[in-house]
Image (tube, coloured by chain):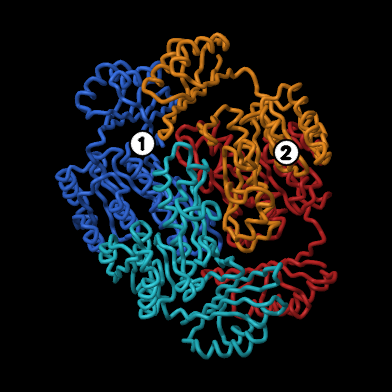
Chain colours: A orange, B blue, C cyan, D red
Amino acid sequence: MSKITLLIHCPDTSGIIAHVTSFFYKKQGNIIYIDQYVDVENTVFFMRLECEFNAETNISATKEEFKETVAEKYNMSWEMYSDNTLPRMAVFVSKYDHCLYDILSRYKSNELKVFIPLIISNHKDLEQVAQNFGIPFHHIPVTAQTKEKAAEIQLELLQKEKVDFIVLARYMQIIPKSLIACFPNRIINIHHSFLPAFAGAKPYHLAYKRGVKIIGATSHYVTEELDAGPIIEQDITRISHSHSIKDLILKGRDLEKIVLAKGVKYHIERKTLVFNNKTIVFI
Amino acid sequence: MSKITLLIHCPDTSGIIAHVTSFFYKKQGNIIYIDQYVDVENTVFFMRLECEFNAETNISATKEEFKETVAEKYNMSWEMYSDNTLPRMAVFVSKYDHCLYDILSRYKSNELKVFIPLIISNHKDLEQVAQNFGIPFHHIPVTAQTKEKAAEIQLELLQKEKVDFIVLARYMQIIPKSLIACFPNRIINIHHSFLPAFAGAKPYHLAYKRGVKIIGATSHYVTEELDAGPIIEQDITRISHSHSIKDLILKGRDLEKIVLAKGVKYHIERKTLVFNNKTIVFI
Amino acid sequence: MSKITLLIHCPDTSGIIAHVTSFFYKKQGNIIYIDQYVDVENTVFFMRLECEFNAETNISATKEEFKETVAEKYNMSWEMYSDNTLPRMAVFVSKYDHCLYDILSRYKSNELKVFIPLIISNHKDLEQVAQNFGIPFHHIPVTAQTKEKAAEIQLELLQKEKVDFIVLARYMQIIPKSLIACFPNRIINIHHSFLPAFAGAKPYHLAYKRGVKIIGATSHYVTEELDAGPIIEQDITRISHSHSIKDLILKGRDLEKIVLAKGVKYHIERKTLVFNNKTIVFI
Amino acid sequence: MSKITLLIHCPDTSGIIAHVTSFFYKKQGNIIYIDQYVDVENTVFFMRLECEFNAETNISATKEEFKETVAEKYNMSWEMYSDNTLPRMAVFVSKYDHCLYDILSRYKSNELKVFIPLIISNHKDLEQVAQNFGIPFHHIPVTAQTKEKAAEIQLELLQKEKVDFIVLARYMQIIPKSLIACFPNRIINIHHSFLPAFAGAKPYHLAYKRGVKIIGATSHYVTEELDAGPIIEQDITRISHSHSIKDLILKGRDLEKIVLAKGVKYHIERKTLVFNNKTIVFI
């Protein structure tokens, strides 16, 4: 038994679904998930498909065949994954521990089908947490002066560990362009507001000042423009006049944990596609 | 320009999606919506598809062709609808007006793609509301003695008006089996609790007594067993110890309106399939 | 039996609650609701209290006595209301009918303890709706040239009808400063986004473009700065990549109705206080 | 600086609020929180109050004085707490780790103002988790035969550690009456359904079978009747036909964590009162 996950986008035209599904039918696969979406404005077709096979599949051969018989015909951008290799995820943290505890708990409970080879931090505060969960911890201090140098050390570690994507679990530093360029749509951040409201620093303080009745959190892919990347997931919670900034921060913690975990899970399970700075999330 | 909506369920096997989508591809249709679901336990395949055509389609001929080339091969239960005929919906009410106001407002605002030929009530209280919205109102009193007779009169009216389905907008009577039998999975009720909690009479009183922190509403298809039919939609709202039964009733009104409207909309837009007393809702 | 509602804010100091509650205790009143809030930053005390009396109360005499024995001592800003006069509410609309239908349905169902003497619109489209519900409708066209003149006519009508507050039920015009000045924190608007995100025109288009996963609505008091007044209530609904702008508009209608109705209800029931461009909502 | 928290219930009559607040006013306290609720049906008055003092307070003397001058006069049931002693909480677990991870993470992050002297389990599976967080772990096996004996050992441990209340973090055993009797309204359980729907075993399986569109979780105080104790907190999440039982279990984990954590927090912060098998939660 093996499973293949396929993500596609290409210019929209008729016949794509018929051809793709026929491809897997002829290979005796059983399609257990199919969803598609057409961006009518830009006439782009998006699709996600999961197909089970009774035997082992040769993923390289399948890729090659799909490329020749289907993908090239429709000028597709596409990715095909086999379920027998786990994605490799790095976690960046600073001093806040709630998102880190949440991710590592889910990891230990086998809720996240991923492998975490390392945690990177600009502070030493959470080293003990990493140790308790048995994950290698790397302390890489970041100052205004050492910013670029730190990014180099980070990149070296990430490449050595063959990291596929990065999760910023309340990592309080701006990611240098050089690092973003190496992980396009592969760095997931959690921002503690319902973006685009209150982008930038201290969103809970701004929310308090404006007197909103709901606060939110947003997980998104990191792009060069701060807090402006493709949104993966958002959620909110109600507040009232009686909540202080401290209350907002405390209530926000649960939001941040849940919204980041969902974003990370969607990414791990290959449910996200990015186009025009927006995500298509097939759930 | 014309549109066809197709609903299918059949024994699961491989190749169904490929064959169905090829059918529409060959007819030069453009699939704008496809979703499928496999009930693994019962090995049943479900599918909903919308297909646009540049020209008018001959729905009868398409049905015939689909039956012969696809449906029979896979032993399908299926329905095919053209978008150029509106479904015809009857509304049953008693004395509560909030759900009726809500439905008629949505109807007048063109939010519901449906035609309402008549409103039936066992009381005269809401006749004025029906008149204000210009809908024929039929007063059919129901007593323990006249129950069956009333059902006959109702059925006659419904058939005369070629009604496709019925909405019980807080109609406080139990529907006789004879009427249910004529409209299987075509009578939509709103129950004022999150079923299966608090089935039967006075759910807000029961919720208050139990001290729940959330109350709910449920729209479902009517079956012979009271409040036990396939659930279409549910929603909830928070309450606290400080809310009296009267408060629950008031807060529940908004829930009932929204949950009934959603259930009705899904039905109108052919988004629901019923199997084993459960709904598949393709949204 | 009679009921008094009291709203207070004043510099915070100890003893206020003891003195206020003693005042009503001595008058043989039964406090059925009390809530208070202290703005620690600005050391301001806020309070809302409902008190029932077995006999009729002389509201003028009670006010005078409260002023002399309590209010002046603590330098209070305060309002005291008797439950035997209904507030008078004007509704402003343009062409969208969903919020108007919702408000008038609630009004007819006795859900809103208010009197609506008139509806004002810059278009004639909704005259029929007003007539169906039996409310006088005034068509006052507004153009760039007639803006100020229109405001004068509106104000005259509002004063003639002794209107206490105004509800903008998707009234698509900016309210002139002259009118705002006559109704400070007494004009309630519904904005179709979770403010402060997407203030100004076309918020659903902006939400679509940004690719958010939730949309919202906000009811707020109108101030001179557009969409920047004190927020009374907000709510949200989930969307996905598959929703078009048209879908957002449709989904947003239910949000707008609920959020506006809640804001209006809180205002009618004297549950709101405004301070520093924020609301205290005692619910 | 010190803080006192007061919880009261007593027969309703006028003057209670005035007398209680005057008591603290005379002691130069500053009331920073006051909320009250009247159960009109049973004419019972409930109140929660927080009062700050600039100096240290003698809690015993204050209690004595309050008893003599206020509590006896109104025949009050009441509890008064000083903020300088932490409540002591025991955690019971079986094999599921998600609620334990959640509670211990919040504990380590100082989100829960509590002290956890021990974890008790009928299995050894989670011993390592307890050790990683540095909490003593006691393995007390429970079989049909050893049930009462186990309860004795548990009780001895709980008394030795001066435990104030118990949290059942998915502890899959029924608590013996003898233990419940020692901790009345002081054992908090998490049930994985929106009670009263799906009480008892395997609620996710029952929810799946019934085809509900929302699932829930409920934290409640344990009473002799299974899953019928006073509800503290509930929350829900949406599901669809496409979710398998396994999906429900997975989605339910986040619900269980949040709903249990909220119930525990309310209890720790003395925000709950129990009356007639219902909770008053002052938030």
Crowd class of label 1 (few under 14; some 14 to 19; many from 20; radius 10 Å) = many
Give the quadrant of residue A219. top right
Query: Quadrant location of the N terminus of chain A?
Result: top right
Amino acid of disc 2? Leu
**Residue D229 visible in this rendered orientation of the protein:** no
- B150 on left or right of D110: left
- A277 on left or right of A224: left
Amino acid of disc 1? Thr
Crowd class of label 2 (few under 14; some 14 to 19; many from 20; radius 10 Å) = many
Q: Nearest the camera: B141 or D2?
A: D2
Number of numbered discs on residues? 2
Q: Nearest the camera: A170 or C16?
A: A170
Q: Which residue is mark 2?
A: A100
Q: Against D94, is C174 above or below? A: below
Q: Residue C101 at x, y = what percent?
A: 34, 60
Q: Against A107, is A215 above or below? A: below
